Image (spheres, rainbow, N blue to C red):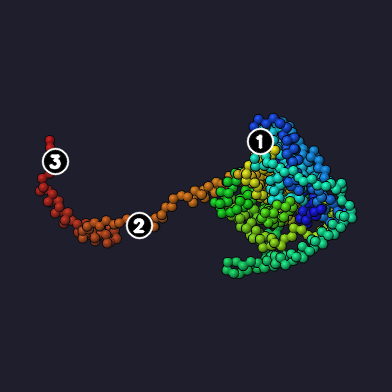
Amino acid sequence: MNHLSGSDATFLHTESPEMPMHVGSLNVMDLPEGYTGDFFEDAKAAMAQRMHLADVFTRKLALMPFDLSNPVWVEDEDIDMDHHMRHVTLPKPGSNRQLQQLVARLHSSLLDRSRPLWEFFIIDGLKSGQVALYTKVHHAGIDGQAGVALGRAMFDTEATGRYIKPPRVKARRGQYQLGVAELAGAAIRNTVQQYVKLFKMAPAIAKAGRSMVVPAKDESGKRDWSLPKASELFAPRTPFNVSITNQRSFAGRTVPLAEVKMIAKRMGVSVNDVVMATTAGALRRYLAESHELPAKSLSAMVPVSLREAGDTTANNQVSMIIASLATDVADPAERLRKIHESSSASKATMGRIKAAIPTDFPMFAAPWLMSGLTSMFGRSRLVNVIPPMANLVISNVAGIPAQLYFAGASVVSYYPVSIPAHGMALNVTVQSYNGRLDYGLIACRRALGDINELGDFMLSEHQILLDLAKAQAAAETAPAVAPAAALPAPAKRRVATSPAKKVALKRVPTVAAVEEVKAVRAPAKRARKAASSDTPKIGLAA
């Protein structure tokens, strides 16, 4: 029996039919050359052999009586692979647009909480001859980095696969659900443990609170005690900051990871800054076309991992920062610089308080209250009138840099599929994979119907930033030319000067000075003329 942490359980308690809380991915794959088998059956058999490699495949929820506390994870002894693995064939012509529409539709439905919280879909019928794998897993059991660990259990680095050691045989409990007394006792013990954890974290929380109240010193050693501007506390309202439905629209776009890294290096920013700047430029163009671009800059909520290095546990260890997108700046280079400044400041603040952010906290008697408030918040459309804290979510997940294979098929793409929420109907998540950076854009269909247009704008903005980076690189590598002032002056040739010429050069060239020079030169000129008249001419022979 394993209790959900406070962070994990929050994704369960805030879930509603309009706001499913699962994350997923879309992988397009190339079948082996000359393949003639049934890929769906091969994929299902491959997954059955490795179910024990990740807890998310075999555990399910056991709910507490009256939702007085967080549920617990228990082992599922009767996993139905036909439920968890599905087969879908696209209608003709099997275009990429049809594939994306299918993923949006599949992502809008809730997972069955009586079973392990995951579903896989094998999709064929693509006109390219490829197959696709769409996965969805509940966020209560996994975050972005834990999802990478899940991918390592699913995928192989060789087309021939790898040897999977079978699981050890366990004694069956023969229980579908735990008893009420057992669950109630576990809830009380877990609540006590959570209060103990908070008590032990009290010094770190107090230190973090002081760092938020007392500003850091600047380069001169002074502290800036000025209060933040009220306008910075909220983001401007956009068409994305509304109450959402369960209808979804999805689009995937890809840019070379090497180009993104080049932009980051040449412009002196991070890869995440480039992702935000690309998204910001696309949003600016999208909203400007419909005359809905606010004068104030949009802001993004950006997940920040709290996970320690090497930690691969399948739970949530994440917090959020808010960064400006500088959409009020027209110049792309200046916009990127401001985004870098904003995100760096937010990360610095998070760095001071990161150790004091609890990922597990008491929630006794809170689950039913949270669920009710979330439902009321969305359906009352209160979110349509209150100022938004941020306009959208932008997340960057570091993926796997190697070529992957699934059931023998070569994985070509790794598009993330994430969660829109009430008040933030648009989510942009990117994941790196094997030299690519795959953008996954998902939104409420009513709030953002043509999400493909926004995706196309992102590709255009990426090209603009790439051109700026190339121009910067060309300027840095161009041969240096010494300025004119630094060049040595040419040596002056000494020429014999007559007394008359010296007089002329020392004076200002006025009319009177010219006449004076002529008077001085006249006797010498007459003497040379007389001498030349007495000298015989020398000519060519006849």
Residue shown at 10% from the left, 48% from the top: 534
Report x, y in % for residue 178.
87, 51
Nearer-the-camera pick, 299 or 475: 475
Amino acid carrying label 2: it is Pro
- Find out whether the residues at labels 2 and 1 contact each other: C-beta distance under 8 Å: no
Image vertical order of residue 44 relative to residue 470, above or below = above
Nearer-the-camera pick, 517 or 424: 424
Q: CA distance from mark 2 to mark 1?
A: 66 Å
Q: CA distance from mark 3 to mark 2?
A: 47 Å
> Along the horizontal axis of the image, is 61 left or right of 434?
right
User: Can see residue 236?
Assistant: no
Amino acid carrying label 1: it is Asp
Residue shown at 30% from the left, 56% from the top: 491
Q: Which residue is mark 2?
A: 488
Residue 30: image tag:
1
Q: Residues within 10 Å of mark 2 (few under 14, many from 20)?
A: few
Residue 539: image tag:
3
Report x, y in % for residue 394.
68, 50
Image vertical order of residue 163 relative to residue 222, above or below = above
Mark 2 vs mark 1: in front: 1
